[in-house]
Image (spheres, rainbow, N blue to C red):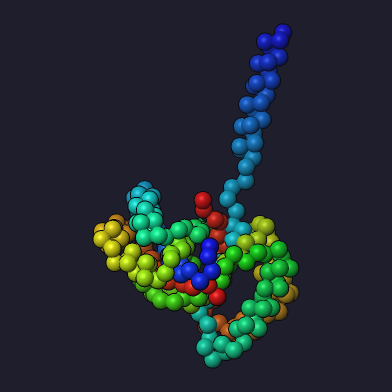
Amino acid sequence: MEENRPLLVITAIANKQNMEELQQYLGRVMQIFGQHGGKPVGRYKTIEQLTGEDTPEMIAMIEFTDTESIKDMISSEGFQGLSEMRARVFDKLNLMICGGM
Amino acid sequence: MKTITKTFIAALFIVLISATSFAQEPAEGNTLVISAVINKENKAKLPEYLGKMKEVFKEFEGTPVGKYKRISIIDGDATPEMIAIIEFPNQEAITNMIESDSYQGLSDLRESVFSELSLSTYAKQN
């Protein structure tokens, strides 16, 4: 992971009724990230919430060259074309751009 | 006799490999993810808190993976301002850290610097 490169951080709670479709979605969206220069940095699934509320079940971090690439990816036909699938496979979804501290 | 010995050794090898596979431990939550919203009134105390927590993590063999601040929200309504990821040798180390005097001793400072704070253990996926 290179310093100063922005990360797309995704936190989510899966829709348990569509777990099979979730795997399809993850495969497709990873390809779209790659098409825009996104490089997976880490993917985590919750084991236990220690304190706080509304812990996501999964966290993914994808490094991009710059914030413009992230925004281009989000507005791309590829990513937008998955919106219905995305709505089916996640109960909650948050996407944000983060930088290193 | 030689054939029986070879067959026996091969069978023993297969049993040992199978036993090893079954003995593999399931994925453990040895990654601590901290997500937080900062209390803007006490922002000046945050570096002090983060510096002290770095020592606490070290005491329990936690290795910082990364510390991130939110630049912008693309979608969703539950986005933290800050995320920190620390890897520990195992989940027990995380539990011990949370229960320690060192960590508990920072609770007043922690409450003053964060409006919201969430700690969870995660398993890293390949």
Q: Quadrant of the N terminus of chain B?
A: top right
Q: Which quadrant of the figure has residue B48?
A: bottom right
Q: Which quadrant of the figure has residue B11?
A: top right
Residue in the image at 69% along x and 20% along y: B9
Residue A23 position, x and y percent, is: 38, 50
Residue in the image at 41% along x and 76% along y: B72
Q: Nearer the viewer, residue A29 or B5?
A: A29
Residue B73 position, x and y percent, is: 39, 75
Residue reaching furthest to the top: B1
Residue in the image at 52% along x and 88% along y: B40
Evaluate whether residue B88 shows in this view. Answer: yes
Give the side of residue B36 with respect to residue A81, left or right. right
Residue A45 position, x and y percent, is: 50, 57
Looking at the image, how many numbered discs can be counted on the residues?
0
Q: Which quadrant of the figure has residue A71?
A: bottom left
Give the side of residue A88 with respect to residue B87, left or right. left
Q: On screen, A96 above or below B25?
A: below
Residue in the image at 66% along x and 57% along y: B90
Q: On screen, B90 above or below B46?
A: above
Residue B5 position, x and y percent, is: 71, 14
Q: On screen, A23 above or below A64?
A: above
Q: On screen, A18 above or below B83?
A: above
Evaluate whether residue A16 shows in this view. Answer: no
